[in-house]
C-alpha cells in the first residue's frame, strides 16, 4: 500500500532537510516560502548537499543537473510528482 505524498508532507521534508543542512532554527524554517530562491539559502555546493539530504528522506531521485530547481517550491513540487509516480 503506497502513501500519498501531500503538499504538507513534502513541505515538512524540505523544512527538515533545510534545518539539517543549513542549521536553521524553527523560526527561520517557518519563514521559508515556496518562492524562496535556493540561491538565497546558500551556494551551489550547498544546494547539491541539500538535495543529498532530501534523498535521505525520499530516495535517490534527484537529477544530477539541479538547474531546474530555482526555488523551494520547485523542490516541493518535484518530490510530490516523483512520489505520485511510484
Image: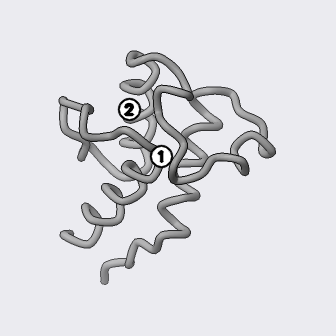
* Position of residue 20 measured from the top left corner of the image (x, y, whole percent): 61, 33
Residue reaching furthest to the bottom: 1
Q: Is residue 61 above or below residue 64?
A: below
Badge 1 density bin: few <14, some 14–19, many ≥20, Cα 10 Å:
many
Query: Which of the two residues, 61 or 70, is positioned nearer the viewer here?
Result: 70
Give the CA distance from mark 1 to mark 2: 15 Å
Q: Which residue does the numbered mark 2 point to in the structure image?
A: 52
Q: Quadrant of residue 51?
A: top left
Is residue 32 toward the left or the right of residue 14 in the image? right
Q: Residue at x 42, y 26 (%)?
A: 47
Q: Position of residue 39 (x, y in %)?
A: 47, 26
Could you say where residue 23 lies in the image, as x and y percent from the top left?
Answer: 69, 27
Instruction: Mark 1 vs mark 2: give the one in front.
Output: 1
Indicate the quadrant where residue 4 lies: bottom left
Quarter of the image that includes the N terminus: bottom left
Give the mark, 1 or 2, whose residue is nearer the N terminus. 2
Report the residue at 54% width, 59% height from top: 11
The C terminus, quarter of image: bottom left
The total of numbered circles placed on residues is: 2
| Res 72 label | 1
**As drawn, is 57 to the left or to the right of 36?**
left
Crowding near the residue tagged with mark 2, few <14, some 14–19, many ≥20 C-alpha atoms within 10 Å: some
| Left or right: 70 as drawn, with respect to 15 | left
SS at mark 2? helix
Please state if 85 lies on the left or on the right of 73 as rendered: left
Depth order, front residue of 9/68: 68
Q: Judge whether 77 appears above or below 24 on screen.
A: below
Query: Relative to residue 6, is residue 18 depicted above or below?
Result: above
Tell me the SS state at disc 1. helix
Judge whether 50 appears above or below 28 on screen. above
Give the camera-side residue of 31 and 1.
31
Amino acid at each position: 500500500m503506497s502513501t500519498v505524498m501531500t503538499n504538507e508532507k513534502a513541505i515538512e521534508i524540505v523544512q527538515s532537510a533545510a534545518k539539517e543542512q543549513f542549521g536553521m532554527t524553527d523560526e527561520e524554517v517557518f519563514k521559508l516560502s515556496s518562492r524562496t530562491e535556493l540561491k538565497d539559502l546558500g551556494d551551489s555546493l550547498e544546494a547539491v548537499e541539500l538535495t543529498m539530504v532530501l534523498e535521505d528522506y525520499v530516495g535517490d531521485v534527484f537529477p544530477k543537473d539541479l538547474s531546474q530547481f530555482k526555488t523551494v517550491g520547485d523542490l516541493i513540487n518535484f518530490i510530490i510528482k516523483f512520489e505520485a509516480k511510484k
